[in-house]
Amino acid sequence: MSYFQALALALLQGVSELFPVSSLGHTILVPALLQWHNIDRASPSFLAFVVVLHLGTALALILYYREEWYAIVRALLASVVRGHLSDDREERIGWRLVVGTIPVGILGVIFEHPVRKLFGSPAPAAIFLLINGLVMFAGEALRRRQHGAASGKYKPIEALSYPQSLLIGVAQALALLPGISRSGVSMVAGLLFDLDHENAARFSFLLATPVIFAAGLLEVPKLFAPGANIVLIEAILGGIAAGVAAYLSVAFLMRYFRSNDLRPFGWYCVVMGAVSFVLARKGVIS
């Protein structure tokens, strides 16, 4: 992997991880579309490189939400010391994040190896990316059916029930499939549980942070394994670039979702997925 390729993939990951277009799907499809045959997408070292990019993204999210995370962690620790729950807003959000993180932790351990087999081929990623777009269209249609043109009926994050938080976490776990967006599917789930777009995005980004950070820390030792040290410098520089791109992306998206919805991203995913699948089936990309 050249430095240019590492930087390009880092910027791509930093943007596409938070935009609801699947960073993992793009990490598979873009090298295939650009005919970067020197990159073995199925190799353990490439996966470790990608996860270090995720680590940079997680650090950017922690930095962006640093005040909120400080309040949430402090409230969680206080509730543990106290031995019971209260009506504190940050505490309620914190425990909903804990519950929502459980599914991806369990499913990630169970399906990690089977899902890795999909990383080497662009066709599955293209199909899942197309499905990701359709999910966003369906979510927006169902949300409009629930709320119509009315406003003011949405609830804050702390009003989510624990079962709803768990189901949003299950939706997030679908992002183990390359082409399914972590933020996209968890936002759709949040919308269906009566969050508005801005709060659905905020809960999605907060929910993703510990998962991405933990996955990055677990994969970092693989960069030091025999034969994998060749990507160490590229991974470090890539992680920094991904973090900068992610910080700018979340700042943009939190403004965007105050008055916009998921449909533009849905159109992009459907078109990109369909074109990539046709090219893969014709053998143009592999």
Image: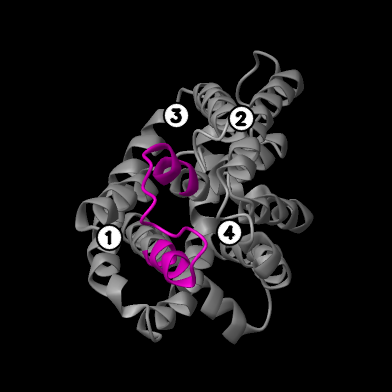
Drawn side of residue 143 relative to residue 178, left or right: right
Closer to us: 137 or 37: 37
Drawn side of residue 174 relative to residue 18, left or right: right
Q: Earlier in the sequence, mark 2 or mark 3?
A: 2
Quadrant housing residue 62: bottom left
Q: Which residue is mark 1?
A: 238
Q: Earlier in the sequence, mark 3 or mark 1?
A: 1
Vertical placement of 251 versus 145: above or below? below
Q: What percent of the width, then of the height, locates residue 231?
A: 30, 70
Kind of residue at badge 2:
Gly
Disc 1 from disc 2: Cα separation: 27 Å
Disc 2 from disc 4: Cα separation: 28 Å
SS under mark 3: loop
Q: What percent of the width, then of the height, locates residue 202?
A: 49, 46
Q: Main secondary structure of the magenta part?
A: helix
Residues at badges 1 and 2 in contact (C-beta under 8 Å)?
Answer: no
Residue at point 48%, 48% (across, down): 28
Which residues are the magenta region?
A: 28-52
Drawn side of residue 142 relative to residue 152, left or right: right
- Count every numbered label the image shows and give the total: 4
Question: Between tags 1 and 4, which lies in front?
Answer: 1
Question: Between tags 3 and 1, which lies in front?
Answer: 1
Closer to us: 34 or 197: 34
Q: Which residue is mark 4?
A: 93
Kind of residue at badge 1:
Gly
Kind of residue at badge 3:
Arg
Question: Between tags 2 and 3, which lies in front?
Answer: 2
Q: Which residue is mark 2?
A: 133
Disc number placed over residue 258 in the picture, else none: 3
